[in-house]
Amino acid sequence: MSALQARPPGIEFTPWPPELARQYRQAGYWLDRPLDALLADGLAIAPDATALICGEGQFSYRDMAQAVERLAASLWTRGLRRHDTALVQLPNVAEFYLVFFALLRLGVVPVNALFSHRRHELLAYAAQVRPRLLIADRSHALFADEAFLTVLQQDHPQLGQVLLRGETTGPRSLAQALGSPLPPTWPGDAGPTPADEVAFFQLSGGSTGTPKLIPRTHNDYDYSVRRSAEICRLSPRTRYLCALPAAHNFPLSSPGALGVFHAGGCVALAGSPEPLACFELIERHQLTMTGLVPSAVSLWMQAVQDEPARRHQLQTLSLLQVGGASFAESQARRVTEVLGCRLQQVFGMAEGLVNYTRLDDEEARILGTQGRPMSPADEVQVRDPQGLPLPPGEVGLLATRGPYTFRGYYRSPEHNQRVFDAQGFYCSGDLVRQTAQGDLCVVGRVKDQINRGGEKIAAEEVEDLLLRHVDIRQVGVIAVPDERLGEKSCACFASSRSDLDAPSLRRFLREQGVADYKVPDRFERLPALPLTAVGKIDKQALRALIDKAAPLSQARETP
Ligand code: OOB
């Protein structure tokens, strides 16, 4: 293979039509700047202010910029170049952002896997992007020894570079790469970044067998972050707690950590949304804002109610964003009273469109809706099953396009055919109602997905894994209501073996290396699964059946 063939000219993606791209530029949405300009914005505002807090470690904007440049230079010296791809898996640690910005700086395009992902997900991402670089963490079970690394490198001969957090010395030490002096050969810059190219891949919650990747361009993502920061009125005084997985679109960009860096504020990292640890962080670092999924909000409210004295720890918290899953109005109503802060509802998706209630909206809109699109250029339609627009007030399918909503999943022509219409509208699979004022209320979903406390599970992905079991004839994974998480997953299966039980199926799935949150909470063995007229598993009938059935195996084993 020649050197030219070895490096792709650019990461392929479906571009916006030129006329719309022209309009987005003219309106000032697309600024044709690279995504790492967001960090440069903060650096210009407050170089010596604390940008990032992780455990006992703190970084000023200057410290961050320096570490990012060192890492970029080190990666450049190792031969990484624009349009190479990277597979990154880091927990909520400072290195997550340092790596992200260093890769953007070089034009290396990462997939940021969630820390809960395991072999199944990482292999699926690697197969799609064919990474030249892996950045992972020794504290993750997969990278505690060499076994999985060896498999990855055997399957992916192009994977020439590996950096590991937690490896203290040697060429694979991420810490060393972050701290090493700039090599004399480093040109200081990897050359101009075309901002209409792919900056990184977001992860889709998915509804298909293989997890899909969402190419996000510098222009579209940069705009979504700047506009979000404006709507949430971020400033250098904003002190944001990132308690959801840092790579997720909500805490990354809505306005998330990137919005806070853009505004010159400070981001503090928590390992999880567990209330007591988060409360300590809020108190200790005087944090003013965070974003949570509804199930975490319930835990926070419970923690304050159990121990009212804790409320003083939240004194500085002025804004709580809630999104990612359905938030009951009855819960929303209690937020200000119990936690003492303002509420903002956020209805977004990694594919693009993000809706916010506005900070000065009247109470009824904040409590009773999931907000409205952030951009005047977002086009949102509520459609009937035939694709015809419905009037306000009617429930229908959400279709959208706009300056930061993607135009196609990576290398997925068939799936794209299904979820995009001829005008480039993306059909998210959400059932919504739009009020006369333009606010959206999420009322349900038609996509085959389970929303387990904000964690999205593609039914088909779990079904495909279960069908690998020799004793399973048919399987359908559905959502069942759960008080704590909103939804849990239930796998209904037919098998000739009457002794096939939940523990053995859980064990089987874990052996397939699937993320733990995808392992069904409940298993139901049925004589046969109901089928539709075309012979597919009838999920509606299955849900009705399961509604009536007494749960046989609700208890979830700890992994
Ligand atoms: C966010 O992004 P994803 O990609 O994990 O999930 C998107 C899906 C939506 O299509 C919808 O089904 C559901 O999650 N969702 C909500 C919701 N926010 C998201 N369902 C009901 N109420 C809400 N407020 O989840 C995401 C991305 C950016 C910002 C916020 C959330």
Image: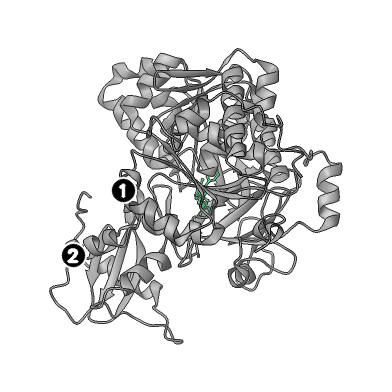
- Report the side of 228 relative to 337 (left or right): right
Residue drawn at the location 69% of the way across and 34% of the way down: 226
- Report the side of 251 relative to 382 (left or right): left
Residue drawn at the location 57% of the way across and 40% of the way down: 78
Residue 215 location (% of width, % of height): 63, 53
* Mark with earlier residue (2, 1): 1
Is ligand 1 less than 8 Å from the beta carbon at label 2?
no
Residue drawn at the location 54% of the way across and 53% of the way down: 131
| 474 lies above or below 447 | below
- Report the side of 56 relative to 178 (left or right): left
Q: Is residue 422 visible?
A: yes
How many dots with numbers? Answer: 2
Pick out the residue farthest to the top: 48
Residue 170 location (% of width, % of height): 42, 33
**Circle number at residue 255:** none
Q: Nearer the viewer, residue 100 or 175?
A: 175
Pick out the residue farthest to the left: 499
**Circle number at residue 504:** 2
- Report the side of 558 relative to 87 (left or right): left
Q: Is residue 94 visible?
A: no
Report how far apart the C-alphas of labels 2 and 1 lie in the structure.
Answer: 26 Å
Q: Amino acid at mark 2?
A: Ser
Visual colour scheme: one colour
Residue 223 location (% of width, % of height): 71, 39
Residue indicated by mark 1: 483
Q: Amino acid at mark 1?
A: Glu
Which is more foreground, mark 2 or mark 1? 2
> Regarding mark 1 in the picture, which secondary structure is present there?
loop
Q: Nearer the viewer, residue 91 or 30?
A: 91
